[in-house]
Amino acid sequence: MNVLTQVEQEGAYSNLLLNAALQKSSLGRNDAGLATELIYGTIARLNTIDFFLDKFVNKGVHKLQPWVRALLRISLYQIMYLDRIPDHAVVSEAVNLAKRRGHQGISGMVNGVLRNILRQKDSLVIPEDISAAKRIALLHSHPEWLVERWISQYGIETAEAICAANNEPPAVSVRVNSTMISREDMLKLMSSQGVDAVPSALSPYGIIVSGAGNMALTDWYRDGMISIQDESSMLVAEAVQPEPGMRVLDCCAAPGGKTAHMGEMMKDDGTIIANDIHSHKGKLISDQASRLGLDSISIVTGDALDLADRFEPASFDRILLDAPCSGLGVIRRKPDLKWGKSQEDIQQIAALQLRLLESVSTLLRPGGILVYSTCTIEPLENEGVVSAFVDSHPEFAIAEDGLGALSRLSEKSLRRGGGIQILPQDYHSDGFFIARIGRRPS
């Protein structure tokens, strides 16, 4: 309840607040898991919960004190979406919390609202006589403007599939450090220790792990044999196709997953310049590199727009611009995201992305490859930026071999603007856009 109240009042990130709260508490693994489910689930289903609460709260849910609103939301989430917690236990816990935090009047109101909801549980259905966008927005809990946008870009059926996929729990996926062990051997090792693991269908470097807890606490992680990374994110280094001996620039590198993957693919032979605007994030990259035994990664700190002034023109064989973006492809991992974005945010960030691309492209040697990637599914930020860049820079074009190794994904994912758009429902991974741009030989 406190975490949800702070998220709403301070605009704080739920994952940071939750981690801090869990560290302070002494909850066992199951209770910590339940707390996580209640917080992320309530945020993920926010507008559906509020839609129904409004019918039972006099003057509407937004007139309540923030902590009371959080308490009712978390209670209705359990009643509507969880099946192992008895309804009477939800009511009793909520009333006790209301007494502890407030007074008799508030606990009476909370008791009355929740008991009324239980008596009319059958009425908790989405009305049918509403627009497709409103129905999808309420059924799958997304802002209506965003649903309308996706319907116009992808059609009703795909827009609904995106929203449904965004509410699925994310899989735990790890990337195998190919400089130390093959994926087959890693799978055998996991299996021998009773870990439920299967090869990723999306990335040849990935493994999906079920029910094994936090993989960052394993010896395999500590010893550098695996890294935790989403499957879609693993495709980016593969698109770059870095080879041993190359000079590579990673423009917006933190926390370093893609940087390290490129280092592994290069067999730690060559140079990778990893840049990030924040120095504390540079430490995350160096920590990754040392854990994985990679010496080829050098870290620089600064605005990616200034990189063209720091390095010689045409001095890199490969450039990765994993651009800052709206993040609308990773909503299942960060449910707060969908409630905090606006149409204006998307337009502003697309303008910045194009400036970044124009600036760093001068550092690519003729014949080299620049990969532009984002973790969003927004066309304006993806094929819109790539098309605008290629159209106004005749010395650049979509790479001759197109998607390269990623052409294998063409059957399931969308080809857009010379790149590939992975939607969250395609492989049950993060939504990602990846395009390969070549500089024509001089």
Image: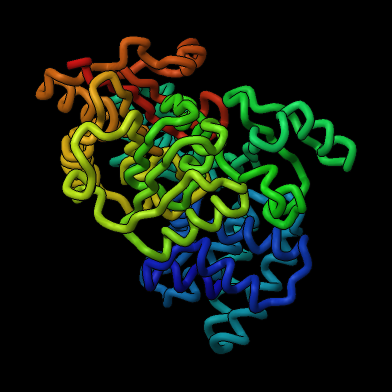
Q: Residue drawn 41% across and 31% down? A: 246
Q: Residue drawn 69% across and 73% down? A: 93
Q: In the rendered image, which quarter contains the C terminus?
A: top left
Q: Quick check: 98 left or right of 162?
A: right
Give coordinates of residue 249: x percent, y percent: 35, 40
Q: Nearer the viewer, residue 136 or 403?
A: 403
Q: Residue drawn 58% across and 39% down? A: 168
Q: Is residue 335 above or below residue 366?
A: below
Colouring scheme, one of rainbow, by chain, secondary structure, one colour: rainbow
Q: Quick check: 219 left or right of 251?
A: right
Q: Nearer the viewer, residue 421 or 386?
A: 386
Q: Quick check: 157 left or right of 101?
A: left
Q: Quick check: 377 left or right of 95?
A: left
> Would residue 162 be seen by someone viewing this image from the given angle?
no
Q: In the rendered image, which quarter contains the N terminus?
A: bottom right
Give coordinates of residue 351: x percent, y percent: 16, 41
Q: Is residue 424 above or below residue 278?
A: above
Give coordinates of residue 11: x percent, y percent: 37, 67
Q: Is residue 185 above or below residue 26?
A: above
Q: Residue drawn 42% across and 23% down? A: 158
User: Quadrant location of residue 236?
Assistant: top left
> Would residue 212 be seen by someone viewing this image from the given angle?
yes
Give coordinates of residue 156: x percent, y percent: 38, 23
In this rendering, the count of numbered labels is: 0
> In the displayed image of the protein, which residue is found farthest to the left?
392
Q: Nearer the viewer, residue 61 or 433?
A: 433
> In the displayed image of the protein, which residue is found farthest to the bottom?
103
Q: Nearer the viewer, residue 204 or 72?
A: 204
